[in-house]
C-alpha cells in the first residue's frame, strides 16, 4: 500500500466522483481510476459501489476511510512538528470562526507579539468547523456555541450577553430594555440558520411563543449593523459586536440571553509554538474583556 493510493482514495471518497477528484488532484481520470483499483486489489475488497459515472462508498470503504484519514492526519502532524522545530518563523496559523466580532482585536494583539507569523481565517458554520477539525485542517476554532466531541478540546473563554439593536428612529429607541414577547411583530435581519447565535435566538424566542420573522438572512454578521442603521429590520447583536453610535442597544428583560464563546482544538493535533502563543492571547484578551463587562 502506497501513500499516494491513500491520498487519491481520500479525494475520491470525499467527492464520490472520479472526474471531480481527478481535476482537484491534477491527474488524469484513468490514472486515478487505476490507482484506486490497485488499492482495492491490495486490500482484497471493493471500496466503492459503481453507480453510472459516480462512486459511492460501501461499508468497506466507509470503515477504511476513517483509518486512512487518521493515518494521513498523523503523517501531516509529523510534518508540521518538524517544520515548527526547523523553521518556527515560517508558520501559518489556520483559524476557523463562527463569530468574528472579536477577531480583529485578537489578531491585532497576536501580531504585536508575533509579527512574523501569518494566519488564514475561515468563517464557517458549526458543522463545517467540526469537519475541518476532524481532518486536522485548522489549528484553532473560535466558536459560539461551544462544540463537544470525543476528539475535541473546548475551553469557554467568554460569556457574551446578546442585545437587541434598533435604529434611532424606532418606537423602542427611547428604551433601555425590552421583553422578547414585545418583539413578536417586528422584522429582523440575521445570519442564516446553522450559525450558533442564530439557532440559540430562534430557540429562545420560540420558547416564549413566536418565531422571529427575517427580512434578511446572510453569512456576514458584520453587515447586520448596516442593515439596522438603514431601518431594514432589528437584529440580535452580541455585546462584543457593538460598533455603531447610530443604533440603540437594548437589554433583554426576563431572559438571560447569552452566548458562550469557546476556543476549540483537536486533542490529537500537534500544537505549534505559534499556536500556543495564540491561545494565550485569546485567553488574555477575553479575561480583560470580562473585567470590563
Image: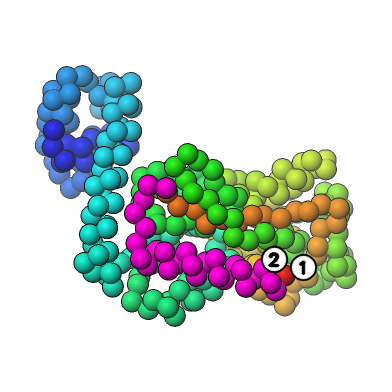
Closer to the chain start, of discs 2 and 1, is: 2
| Magenta-colored stretch includes residue 211 | no
Tell me if I can see residue 227 in this picture: no
Q: Give the image quarter of residue 1.
A: top left
Q: Secondary structure at mark 2?
A: helix
The answer to whether 139 appears left or right of 39 in the picture is: right
In the shown orientation, is residue 178 left or right of residue 61? right
| Residue topped by disc 2 | 239
State the scheme by which the image is colored.
Answer: rainbow
State how far apart marks 2 and 1 are (Cα). 9 Å
Residue 175 placed where, x, y %? 88, 67
Judging by the rendered image, the residue that carries numbered circle 1 is: 249
Q: Position of residue 215 (x, y in %)?
A: 68, 53
Query: What's the magenta region?
Result: 267-292
Residue in the foreground of this view, choosing between 271 and 51: 271
Give above or below for 64 relative to 290: above
Q: Position of residue 245 (x, y in %)?
A: 72, 77
276 part of magenta stretch: yes
Quadrant of the image containing the C terminus: bottom right
Q: Is residue 267 left or right of residue 100?
A: left
Residue found at x 49% / y 76%: 109
Amino acid at each position: 500500500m502506497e501513500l499516494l493510493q491513500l491520498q487519491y482514495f481520500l479525494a475520491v471518497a470525499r467527492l464520490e466522483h472520479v472526474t471531480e477528484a481527478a481535476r482537484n488532484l491534477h491527474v488524469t481520470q484513468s490514472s486515478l481510476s487505476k490507482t484506486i483499483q490497485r488499492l482495492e486489489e491490495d486490500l482484497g475488497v471493493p471500496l466503492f459501489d459503481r453507480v453510472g459515472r459516480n462512486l459511492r462508498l460501501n461499508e468497506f470503504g466507509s470503515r477504511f476511510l476513517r483509518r486512512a484519514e487518521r493515518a494521513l492526519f498523523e503523517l501531516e502532524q509529523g510534518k508540521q512538528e518538524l517544520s515548527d522545530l526547523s523553521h518556527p518563523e515560517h508558520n501559518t496559523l489556520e483559524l476557523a470562526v463562527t463569530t468574528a466580532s472579536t477577531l480583529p482585536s485578537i489578531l491585532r494583539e497576536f501580531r504585536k507579539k508575533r509579527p512574523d507569523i501569518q494566519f488564514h481565517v475561515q468563517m464557517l458554520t458549526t458543522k463545517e468547523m467540526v469537519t475541518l477539525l476532524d481532518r486536522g485542517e485548522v489549528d484553532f476554532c473560535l466558536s459560539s456555541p461551544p462544540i463537544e466531541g470525543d476528539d475535541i478540546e473546548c475551553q469557554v473563554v467568554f460569556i457574551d450577553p446578546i442585545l437587541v439593536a434598533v435604529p434611532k428612529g424606532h418606537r423602542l429607541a427611547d428604551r433601555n430594555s425590552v421583553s422578547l414577547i414585545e418583539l413578536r411583530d417586528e422584522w429582523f435581519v440575521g445570519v442564516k440558520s446553522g450559525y450558533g447565535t442564530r439557532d440559540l435566538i430562534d430557540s429562545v424566542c420560540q420558547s416564549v411563543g413566536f418565531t422571529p420573522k427575517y427580512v434578511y438572512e446572510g453569512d456576514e454578521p458584520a453587515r447586520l449593523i448596516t442593515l439596522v442603521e438603514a431601518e431594514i429590520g432589528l437584529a440580535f447583536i452580541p455585546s462584543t459586536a457593538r460598533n455603531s453610535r447610530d443604533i440603540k442597544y437594548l437589554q433583554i428583560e426576563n431572559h438571560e440571553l447569552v452566548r458562550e464563546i469557546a476556543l476549540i482544538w483537536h486533542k490529537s493535533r500537534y500544537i505549534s509554538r505559534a499556536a500556543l502563543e495564540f491561545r494565550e492571547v485569546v485567553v488574555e484578551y477575553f479575561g480583560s474583556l470580562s473585567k470590563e463587562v
